[in-house]
Structures are given as structure tokens and as C-alpha cells.
Image (spheres, rainbow, N blue to C red):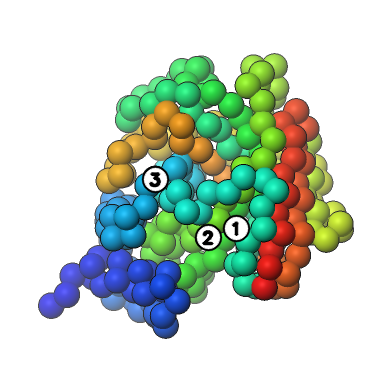
Amino acid sequence: MTDPADLLARRLLEARAGRPAAYEDALAPPDAAAAMAVQAAVARELGEKVAGWKVGIGGDGTPFAAPLLAGALHASPAALPVGTHVLIEMEIAVRLARDLAPGEHSRAAILDAVGEVLVGIEVIRGRLGEPPAIPFLAFLADNGANLAYVTGGGTRAFGALDLTALPCRLAIDGAVEHEKAGGHPQGDPIAPIRAYLARSNDRLGGLRAGHVVTTGSLNKPVRVERAARIEVAIEGLGGAALQLRG
């Protein structure tokens, strides 16, 4: 009998290649470690380098991570032929100056390893679906449904910034969809990195110098179903722009 993890990895690879691929309940990973093993199998098969991570805390309080593969990372301004029906998230990301080893770290120690804090736009589309249509762990196995990540303006002088309360704005085709101060699900965008490192279980080498690490959306994900121009701005960091092409 084919192992469910192998079969899930195969389905995800088929979907990435543009072939029809469907999710079924028998493919559900039993835990986060199993989901991350699928991530690693897919990355190895694709032969893609890990360029960063999306790190977060699940609804049950469990920290998780999903790789940002090199082919998914783009610099602003970007134009991507991603088709339609995607979710857009405005995020604060960091670029690491040094490796962060698994284990307990203080917030200050994590910030000491950061070289730059960045504006980010994540483009999300589940290759086999998205929660609640599929379970979260299957979504995690699909690299958290990361389709693309755009890095924009940033600063090395982030010590004076309150990363928990930066004013931010997201506009689509010039219409403001989200505008407020802060908005991170854990309040502090560094909190998920700290939580994940304490329970790290990835199979792809961990958080390394040069990696872009993003930790959650500042806005409720916005579904975009047409070609559109996405523009975001975060005070103290700068902006980023993405043209979605159908």
C-alpha cells in the first residue's frame, strides 16, 4: 500500500505541474511533523533551494513553519502570471543576518540575528484546496499554500520601531482594502519565530542567514479573482507592489 505521505507529496507535485490533483481524507497528515516531512519531500523532488520560511501559530496554539522556495520569492515591484482566485496578505518579514538554531531564544536574541525588517506580500492558493475544505495539516504540507512572496521596502534601523503597532495599508487597484495600526494575530510579529524555534521540527535545514522569514498577515486575507495591482505600505518600512496577471 502506498504511504499516505508519499501519495500526498505526489499529488502536490502533480498540482504544481498543472496536472489535475485532488485531496482526499486518507491523505491527511497525522501531525505537524508529518506535514513538514511532506514539505521536505516536495522540495527535494523539485530540486529547489529554501529561500525562507513562513512561520506561524495554528488555531490550536501549535507553532509551525513552511518553506518559501527560491522560485516563489520575488522582489517588488513584481508581475506574476498567477491566474485568478488567490488570497493576498500584507506581512512584516525579516531577513536573517545569522542562523537561528532550534531551541529557546529571547525576543532580543532573535532580533539580534535579524539584518533587516521588510514589507511583504504573500500570494496564497492551496494546490489541493484551503481550510476549511481541507484540514490545516494538509494545508501546511502544501507549504501553507504559498504561491508567491514579494519582498518590498525595509530597514536595518528597526530598533526604534514598535513592530507591534506600525500603521499599514493595503490597496487593490487603488481602492483601500485595509488600513490600521498593527493587526498581527499574535500582536508581535517576532512571537511566532520564538515559539517555532522552541519546538522546531523541519526537515530542510532550519532558519539560516539570508533567509526571509515572515510570520503572519496584518490583514484578514483578501480574495482576488481578477487581474489586479496590489500595493501595500507599512510605516517605517516602506512599500511593495505586485501586478497579478490572469
In terms of image quadrants, where is residue 24?
bottom left
Q: Quickly name the residue at label 1.
A: 123
Q: Residues within 10 Å of mark 1 (few under 14, many from 20)?
A: many
Q: CA distance from mark 1 to mark 2?
A: 5 Å
- Which residue does the numbered mark 2 point to in the structure image? 147
Report how far apart the C-alphas of labels 2 and 3 lie in the structure: 14 Å
Q: Which residue is mark 3?
A: 50
* Direction from residue 130 to residue 7 in the image, left or right: left
Percent across and percent down for residue 214 are: 54, 41
Q: Is residue 21 left or right of residue 235?
A: left
Q: Mark 1 touching mark 2, by CB under 8 A?
A: yes
- Which amino acid, by three-letter code, is at mark 3? Val
Secondary structure beneath disc 3? strand
- Could you say which disc has been placed on residue 54 in the image? none
Q: Find out whether the residues at labels 1 and 3 contact each other: C-beta distance under 8 Å.
A: no
Residue occupying image coordinates x 17% and y 75%: 2
Q: Which residue, as the protein is rendered here, is positioned at the far left?
A: 1
Residue 130 pos. (x, y %): 51, 68
Residue 113 screen position, x and y as percent: 47, 21
Circle 3 packing at 10 Å, graded few (<14), some (14-19), many (20+), is: many
Q: Is residue 190 above or below residue 132?
A: above
Judge by depth and name the residue closer to the eye, 156 or 2.
156
**Residue 5, position as x, y percentages in the image:** 25, 65
User: Quadrant location of the C terminus?
Assistant: bottom right
The answer to whether residue 165 of the structure is visible from this angle is no
Instruction: Please report whichever mark, 1 or 2, sits nearer to the chain's N-terminal start.
Output: 1
Question: Is the residue marked by circle 2 packed among few (<14), some (14-19), or many (20+) residues within 10 Å?
Answer: many
Q: Is residue 138 visible?
A: yes
At x 26%, y 72%, the residue is 7
Check disc 2 and report its element: helix, strand or loop: strand
> Left or right of 145: which side holds 29?
left
Between circles 1 and 3, the one closer to the viewer is 3
